[in-house]
Image: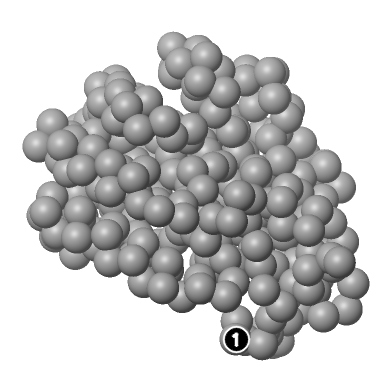
């Protein structure tokens, strides 16, 4: 079947996109703060035990994130003046309230990321999904004091109805469709896609590809340098996806710090959040036919 959610648009045929202050690259950290169920398999560092219940090896590896790794990551973000765009499971508010306190003190942007990272809504009916999303978004609003504007599904999953249901609930954008270096409008009134990355993502780089810390730093540098070159005539977005149980490990922490230092000191970079990217794009581009054209 055809994809009706968005239309094809070649980046070389769009009107120029301009970021605040003349910046060329809008950079944000997508910080995944998640809760995993102990009775379901999920992201694993060793597949040999992934289907066992319980699975202390993989569950414990993931559980390192909210217990220890997140605090190293927070220190690094603070050091470089970067506000996180938090991809938040709604269960985190009840289970790890100390993390919510830290984020509220730092004015993080909070995005809805499902109930937990073990539950996908892919098989839900529209009615079931509407009730599920309503609960998730309401719980996040209650725990953070901020109603989320953005969505990323656990494992970037959606149904064919997810964007329209999110629009009904007042959300503005999704991160799930990782197919562009610029935001664009979906064929759902009021909904945007904002760039996220499954490539510049610590799980993919460290766990799937087996990269080292120095490899990670070089990848971040190469990504930014190329996007900066590409953005001579039209702005780009660079998303760095982090999971505290991966980059929060002691032997990787200094490499995350080095990568963030390079970004924070690079000319022409807007250190921002996914919320601010979505807001700027919505305000400064034409919402009508041929979307992506700049107003004025």
Quadrant where the N terminus is found in the figure: bottom right
The residue at 44%/44% (across/down) is: 29
Q: Is residue 107 above or below residue 62?
A: above
Q: Can the viewer see residue 70 in this picture?
A: no
Vertical placement of residue 104 versus 29, above or below = above
**Where is residue 58 drawn, in percent x and y?**
22, 40
Front residue of 284/102: it is: 284
Q: Nearer the viewer, residue 226 or 10?
A: 226
Q: Residue at x 67, y 74 (%)?
A: 16
Q: Position of residue 18 (x, y in %)?
A: 65, 62
In the depicted view, which residue is nearer to us: 76 or 25? Answer: 25
Residue at numbered disc 1:
12
Above/below status of 246 relative to 212: above
Relative horizontal placement of residue 121, taking residue 106 as reference (left or right): right
Q: Quarter of the image holding residue 53?
A: top left
The relative height of residue 296 versus residue 122 in the rendered view (above or below) is below
Which quarter of the rendering shows the C terminus? bottom right
How packed is label 1: few (under 14 Cα within 10 Å), some, or many (20 or more)?
A: few
């Amino acid at each position: 079947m055809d994809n009706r959610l968005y239309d094809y648009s070649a980046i070389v045929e769009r009107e120029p996109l301009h970021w605040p202050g003349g910046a060329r690259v809008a950079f944000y950290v997508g910080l995944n703060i998640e809760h995993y169920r102990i009775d379901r398999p999920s992201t694993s560092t060793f597949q040999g035990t992934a289907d066992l219940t319980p699975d202390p090896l993989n569950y414990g590896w993931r559980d390192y994130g909210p217990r220890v790794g997140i605090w190293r990551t927070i220190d690094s973000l603070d050091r470089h003046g970067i506000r996180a765009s938090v991809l938040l499971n709604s269960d985190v508010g009840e289970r790890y309230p100390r993390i919510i306190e830290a984020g509220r003190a730092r004015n993080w942007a909070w995005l809805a990321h499902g109930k937990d990272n073990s539950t996908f809504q892919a098989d839900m009916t529209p009615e079931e999904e509407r009730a599920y999303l309503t609960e998730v978004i309401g719980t996040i609003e209650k725990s953070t004091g901020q109603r989320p504007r953005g969505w990323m599904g656990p494992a970037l999953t959606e149904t064919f109805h997810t964007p329209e249901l999110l629009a009904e609930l007042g959300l503005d954008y999704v991160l799930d469709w990782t197919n562009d270096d610029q935001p664009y409008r979906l064929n759902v009134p009021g909904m945007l896609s904002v760039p996220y990355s499954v490539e510049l993502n610590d799980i993919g780089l460290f766990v799937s590809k087996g990269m080292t810390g120095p490899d990670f730093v070089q990848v971040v540098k190469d990504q930014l340098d190329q996007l900066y070159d590409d953005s001579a005539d039209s702005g780009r977005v660079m998303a760095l996806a982090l999971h505290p149980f991966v980059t929060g490990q002691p032997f990787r922490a200094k490499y995350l710090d080095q990568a963030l230092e390079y970004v924070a000191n690079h000319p022409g970079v807007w250190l921002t959040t996914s919320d601010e990217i979505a807001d700027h794009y919505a305000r400064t581009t034409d919402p009508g036919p041929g979307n992506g054209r700049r107003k004025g």
